[in-house]
Image (cartoon, rainbow, N blue to C red):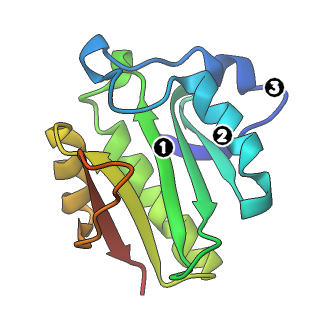
Amino acid sequence: MVKLTDLTEENWMQAAALTVKDSQKGFLAPAIGILARGYVYRNCGARVFVVESDGVAVGLALVREFTDEPLGYDLQQFMIDGRYQGRGYGSAALDLILAELRKEARYEHVEVCVKQADEAAIRLYEKHGFVNSGYLDEDAPDCVNLICRLF
């Protein structure tokens, strides 16, 4: 069973050891970078979720709040360890993340910026209701910005 837990003193080392497949390493930060971003964005309501299955860390997600208009959630990083991919953990975890944000209900949408070359991630997000927002970030011209309405 997949569940989300907050990052804690007890699980951070297991979370920091997670890694994606070599072919995916250019698409997101390493696990320790995700943990560091959680700290850096602490004033933006950042939360690092550890994706667990049967007590074992299988992935990580970082969600923060946008402090600029339009206000919303930013799914800054989301990864499933390469050893656990292809088992439905990513899909189940994304369902849980979206449910958590809907329950929290602070904002109407969540956005994610994905490298255009990361076709598997784009398909996963689209499967969960994300669509291209049309926003082009000059600092990330090789990315597509996806948005999901929560309500």
Tag 2 residue:
37
Check disc 1 and report its element: helix, strand or loop.
strand
- The total number of labels drawn is 3
Check disc 3 and report its element: helix, strand or loop.
loop
Q: Say which quadrant the C terminus sits in.
A: bottom left
Circle 1: residue type: Gln
Distance from the alpha carbon under mark 3 to that under mark 1: 21 Å
Tag 3 residue:
10
Packing grade of label 3 (10 A; few <14, some 14-19, many >=20) is few
Q: Residue furthest front?
A: 138
Circles 1, 2 touching at the beta carbon (< 8 Å): yes
Question: Mark 2 or mark 3: which is in front?
Answer: 2
Packing grade of label 2 (10 A; few <14, some 14-19, many >=20) is many
Sequence order check: which comes first, mark 3 or mark 1?
A: 3
- How far across and how far down the image is residue 111, in percent? 41, 65
Q: Nearer the viewer, residue 9 or 34?
A: 34
Residue 52 lies in what quarter of the image?
A: top right
Q: Is residue 9 left or right of residue 74?
A: right
